[in-house]
Image (cartoon, rainbow, N blue to C red):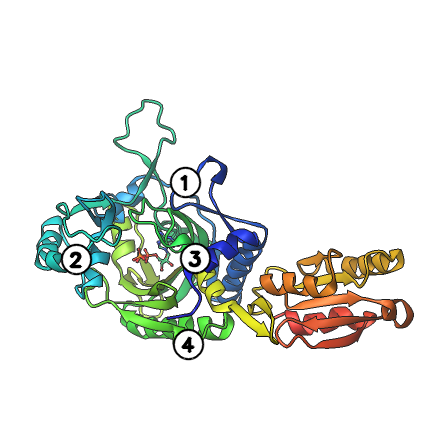
Amino acid sequence: MSEVTLESLVSFCKRRGFVYPSSEIYGGLAAVYDYGPYGVELINNIKQIWWRELVYRYDNISGLDSAIFMNPRVWQASGHVAGFSDPLTECRYCHTRLRVDHLLEGVGAEASDTMSETEINQLFDDYRHLVVCPECGHRDFTQVRHFNLLVHSNLGNFTGNDSNPVYLRGETCQGIYVNYKNILDSTRLRLPFGIAQIGKAFRNEITARQFIFRTREFEQMELQYFVRPTNDLVDFNLWKQRRWDYYINILGIDPANLRWHEHEKLAFYAKAACDIEYNFPFGFQEIEGVHARGDYDLTQHQKFSGQELDYYDQAVDQKFIPHIIESSSGVGRVFLMLLNEAYHEEKLGENDKRVVLKLKPALAPVKVAVFPLLRNKPELIKAAQEVFDQVKMRWRCEFDDNGNVGKRYRRQDEIGTPYCLTVDFDTLEKGTVTVRDRDTMKQTTVQLNELVSYLSSKLDY
Ligand code: ATP
């Protein structure tokens, strides 16, 4: 288990402006959160790095931004209207609603996503005597019911009848599947190729006790990689490796805090399915799914839409429905993982300590802070302002002249700023600034005319 507690991360996020409960002045809204001034910077960096590492790195991957609202038939074809549900039980004592698959996991049993209500009830009955309510410790539960996770809207509904609602999308990948033909027609992409998308998804999650780990509104980063049917397990293993390496080499996660979870019970259409799990303060939990989905998704959309979604492979003069390898992760879960990984409380000497976020520079919300050594010397303030203006359009920067320099360093360490620049009398006389490194706390003198290239050698990745 990692040493940082969830409570310390929650209060840190609130105090330093990373994450706030949604509409807090009205008492909040369960399982919905807002990202504050530093949170939004970290979120943008997470998304930008993901985008670059997929869409820019591989010339056979293109991007997409599809709408949140879709024709409701999409969700019938995908199986979400009938089957996108979690098994729910209620504690008869404290009335907490609980996910039965999670309760079963806690006692060493595994439920599959595809179990019917009867099957999951049977399984739960076999283990019920071992399960205790995590809220009140009692052992008295109601029958298991499937609870559909799709969120309804009243878009375009002027009658008040909710029988055929327009949904808020439950996952972003359906927007990719229904655009696959458009993208084939309007680009020169040929198999194998990928379509990447980042966007909001909505789920009526039953349990929501783990901060931003499980929210009802969240963002997904999804790659759907279209491959020849004969090649899908090769491509599946390729993407497993690429995604694993991404977390370690690009995001800087300690491999000891990551592990694979292989699904034992696969959905009937799936060829293989694995999740990457991270060691959160509440144990190892999923951050990303890497799945070989076969031809299920496109076949379903072909059937329901009546449109041909097959692919003509010139090389072998054959038509077929491509198979799909999916990589799907959540921005909020990556955010929480990164904070957990980066958050350190360090002892400095006998009576001093600092909180420092050891984020990779590319992820840090603020890259550079600029300080005038003294706030009552107008010539220092002016010179510091000039330095700030020189760098602020290139990186997210902060100007701080509040309190002594030591306090300013602490404030920046806490939010993970890799470099602090102090403008002092040498700046006025010799044209230099003092650059202080977050991790080593060492100071270097840099000539002003070399400052931008010095910083870019450290910050740009
Ligand atoms: P879980 O089993 O934890 O509910 P899932 O298997 O339903 O997750 P997927 O449908 O495979 O998740 O979604 C892919 C990714 O989207 C997950 O790995 C996760 O990072 C993210 N995700 C899914 N649901 C949520 C949520 N409610 N809040 C935040 N992120 C989520």
Q: Write down the residue under mark 3.
A: 7
Q: Is residue 141 left or right of residue 395?
A: left
- Which quadrant is home to the N terminus? bottom left
Q: Do the residues under discs 3 and 2 have CB atoms within 8 angstroms?
A: no
Does the beta carbon of the residue at mark 3 sit less than 8 Å from ligand 1? no
Q: Write down the residue under mark 1.
A: 29
Q: Mark 3 and mark 2: span between their CA atoms?
A: 25 Å
Q: Write down the residue under mark 2.
A: 131
Q: Amino acid at mark 3?
A: Glu
Quadrant of the image occupied by residue 376: bottom right
Q: Do the residues under discs 4 and 2 have CB atoms within 8 angstroms?
A: no
Q: Measuring from the top left, give residue 437's x and y in whole percent.
A: 67, 73
Q: Write down the residue under mark 4.
A: 255
| Mark sitting earlier along the chain (2/1) | 1
Q: Amino acid at mark 2?
A: Val
Relative to residue 19, is residue 289 depicted above or below?
below
Determine which of the numbered discs, if any, sits on residue 231 in the image: none
Q: Amino acid at mark 4?
A: Pro
Q: Mark 4 and mark 2: span between their CA atoms?
A: 32 Å
Q: Do the residues under discs 2 and 1 have CB atoms within 8 angstroms?
A: no
**Helix, strand or loop for disc 3:** helix
- Which quadrant is home to the C terminus? bottom right
Residue drawn at 35 percent across, 67 percent down: 277
